[in-house]
Each structure stands twice: as C-alpha cells, then as structure tokens.
Image (spheres, rainbow, N blue to C red):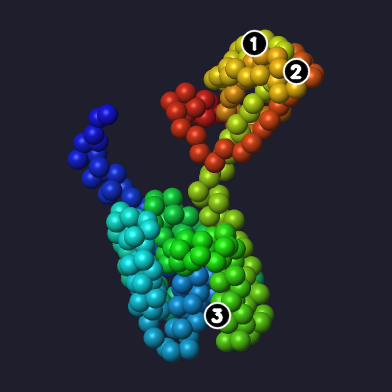
Amino acid sequence: MKKIPVKIKLAMLFRKMIFLTIGAFIAAAAIEGFLAPNNIIDGGVVGISMIASYLSGKNLGLIVMVINFPFLCLAFTKMGKKFVLQTFYAIVMFALALNLFHGHYATNDLLLATVFGGIILGAGVGIILKNEGSLDGTEILSLVLSKKWGLSVGEFIMGLNIFIYCGAGFVFGWGKAMYSMLTYFIAYKVIDIVMEGLNSSKAVRIISDKSYEIGQALIDKLDVGITYLYGQGGYSKKDKMLIYCIISRLEMSNMKEIVREIDPNAFMSIVDVHEAYGARLHKRVDKI
C-alpha cells in the first residue's frame, strides 16, 4: 500500500483548515447577525453559551471556548488527536468571528431571524462537519454517556436540547424558546443538505429472470455502470442473478420504465446513497 506524499497531506490539511475557517465564520455570522440580537439560541454548547453570556454579560466567544474545553479533553480518548485539533481550530475561529461580527445584525424581525439564521447556521456547521470538525462538545459527551445510560446518541442530544430550550424559555420567554427550536430544526435540515448534497443518488437492486436483458438495456439507454451479483432464492432455492447499480434521482423514472417493459414482475429495491465515489460516477454526473 502506497503512502500519501507529505506534500499532498499538507495540501489536504490546508484545504480543510480553509473550509473550517469559512464554516466557522458563516456560523458566527448567523449567531451575531440574526440569532443573538433577537435572543434566539442554538442547541448544544453554543446555546448554553448564549444563555450564559446573556445572564453574565461576558464575551460569548470566550464562553464557547471555556465550555467546550472539557469536551475536547474527553475527545482525545474517544475520537483521536486529528479530530480534536481540527475541532479546536474551528472553535477558535468561531470565537474570533463572533467578536468580529458582534454588534452587526441584519434584522429585528423574529421570523426572518429564525429562518435565515437557521439556514446560514446550518450551512456553516455543515461545512465544518464535512471537514471533520465540530463546534459542539455535547456530541462528544453523548458518545460517552449514551452507552452508560442505555440511550442512543440522538436521544441523548435531543434530551439535552429540550433541557436547554426549557432554560431559554425561562430566560428569554417561551415565544423565543419556540423560535429557537424552529431555528434548530431548520439548521438540522440544512446540515443534511450540506453533508449529503442536493444531487442525491439511489442504490438499486433488481431481481429478475431477465437480468441480462435489463442490465444491457440500462447500459445502452442510461449509460449506467452495473454489477451482476449471484444469489439464491430463499423459498425456491433457485439461482438468481441480481443487478446492482447507482443512479441519480433524475434517472429513476426512466429506469423503472425500462425494467417494467422487459419484466413487469421484476423485484426492485431502492435506497438512498449519501456518498458515492468513482471515476465513472463522476463522468456520468457531469453529463446530467
């Protein structure tokens, strides 16, 4: 196995640092430009920090760094040095950006602040997560405590955020707490889009007695790369030939039509693919 040259490693690291910086600045712009001036909070450590900053009058960026520090120490044993260093860098950039954008806000309209704050925050956090960093130490804590308490990571984070938003209700009022929950929901959806992309692919498995005919038709008409898999029917015990391929969502209807024309009784299993790599795939995406 060939080792990656040092120059390429440094270039990859430099690229990640640039995107971590961009993500941190975008997230900070959402906080200071839309959310914090309207007392709308995010979840996790940032949300706790926003409440603490409001009550104490202390610098928000500094509080974010202080609260995240013990979680970073915990992450050394759970997630490795590389992740911790990249997360630390992202948090430092986020704290600096919060101070840079402090006092500059875009709107006092609560609905606009909620929607656009959530969209921009989700974009920033998504960029950071995609480049192996994080702004939220509660996710690290959830990996440790969820196993001890018999909860999933998602359940732990949801429970913690409910507690945080209840705190926001007492401090800022329940209307602001509900706006905060809406912001979190919007940001969560945008993070998914950033992480997975808009051009989501589908993994398709087709079982048919006319597998070779269907496979050839898919190659000829859709320029799809396919793989034949050998299988055996559980009930009939007969050998079966399965077709496996990855297509874009735009090709779904054409693929179904081709399969039904050749074999109306064909069985198809279709699932979402969050990430797919390969030279042939990239060539096909460029044509779409």
* Left or right: 84 as drawn, with respect to 57: left
Residue 267: image tag: none
Amino acid type, callout 1: Tyr
Count of residue discs: 3
- Most extreme residue toward the right is 264
The residue carrying mark 3 is 39
The residue carrying pointer 2 sits among few (fewer than 14), some (14 to 19) or many (20 or more) residues within 10 Å by Cα, namely few
Give how far across and how far down residue 203 sits, in percent: 60, 31
Q: Residues within 10 Å of mark 1 (few under 14, many from 20)?
A: some
Q: Amino acid at mark 2?
A: Ser
Q: Nearer the viewer, residue 157 or 286?
A: 157
Q: Is residue 187 left or right of residue 52?
A: right
Q: Quadrant of residue 116?
A: bottom right
Q: Which tag is nearer the camera, tag 1 or tag 3?
A: 1
Mark 1 — residue? 212
Is 243 drawn above or below residue 10 in the view shown?
A: above
Q: Where residue 158 sits: x, y (%)?
A: 59, 66
| Any part of residue 137 in sight | yes
Q: Quadrant of residue 73?
A: bottom left
SS of the residue under disc 3:
loop
Element assignment for label 2: loop
Please, what is the three-letter code of the amino acid marked with disc 3? Asn
Q: Which residue is mark 2?
A: 236
Residue name at image x 57 percent, y 59 percent: 152
> Image quadrant of residue 107?
bottom right
The span from disc 2 to disc 1 (Cα, nearest Å) is 20 Å
Which of the two discs, 1 and 3, labels the residue nearer the N terminus? 3
Q: Secondary structure at mark 1?
A: helix
Q: Residue at x 39, y 62 (%)?
A: 24
Q: Residue at x 39, y 51 (%)?
A: 131
Please tell me which residue lies in front, 207 or 234.
Answer: 234
